[in-house]
Image: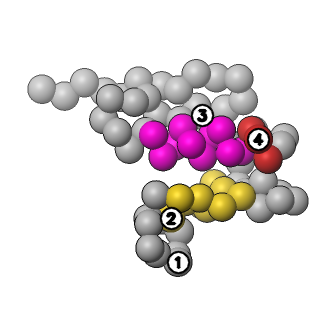
């Protein structure tokens, strides 16, 4: 997976490798908090990609929040 970040709005687009159409568009945090910088958006994008690993938490829902653990299934 890879991502792009708009340098003005900091909106994130996440793509599967080799594809031109993003499967995820994230203009801000899921709770509506804005990304205040490119670096903040980039950190969230990396956490969102990492969250595709079952052992990693979800990316944070808002500014200064931790990632939430995934439900445990047996």
Q: Position of residue 34 (x, y in %)?
A: 79, 43
Of callouts 4 and 3, the N-terminal one: 4
Check disc 1: other Cα within 10 Å, few if <14, some if 14-19, many if 20+.
few
**Mark 1 or mark 4, which is nearer the start of the sequence?**
1
Q: Residue 32: say if magenta.
A: no
Residue at figure coordinates x 66%, y 56% from the top left? 12
Residue 47 spot, x, y in % from top left: 54, 38
Residue at the disc numbered 4: 39
Name which of mark 1 and mark 2 comes first in the sequence: 2
- If you read the primary sequence from the N terminus, does the residue marked by circle 2 or circle 4 appear first? 2
Give the SS element for disc 3. loop
Q: Is residue 41 above or below residue 16?
A: above
Q: In the rendered image, is residue 51 in sight? A: yes
Along the horizontal axis of the image, is 56 left or right of 47? Answer: left
Q: Quadrant of residue 4?
A: bottom right
Height in image: 21 above or below 2? below
Q: Residue at x 38, y 44 (%)?
A: 52
Residue 48 counted in the magenta span: yes
Determine the CA span between mark 3 and mark 1: 26 Å
Using the image, tell me which numbered label, if any, was put on residue 20. 1
Q: CA distance from mark 1 to mark 2?
A: 7 Å
Which class describes the residues within 10 Å of circle 4: few (<14), some (14-19), or many (20+)?
few
Q: Which residues are magenta?
A: 41-50
Q: Quadrant of residue 70?
A: top left
The kind of secondary structure the magenta stretch mainly shows is helix
Which mark lies nearer to you, 3 or 2? 2
Please name the residue that numbered disc 2 is placed on.
15
Residue at 32 percent across and 29 percent down: it is 55
**Upstream in the sequence, badge 3 or badge 1?**
1
The reply to whether dot 1 and dot 2 touch (C-beta < 8 Å) is yes
Q: What residue does disc 3 label? A: 61
């Amino acid at each position: 997976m890879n991502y792009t970040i708009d340098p003005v709005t900091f909106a994130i687009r996440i793509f599967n490798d080799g594809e031109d159409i993003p499967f995820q568009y994230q203009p801000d945090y899921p709770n509506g908090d804005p990304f205040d910088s490119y670096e903040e958006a980039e950190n969230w994008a990396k956490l969102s990609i990492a969250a595709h690993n079952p052992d990693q938490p979800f990316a944070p829902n808002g500014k200064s929040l931790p990632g939430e653990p995934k439900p445990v299934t047996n």
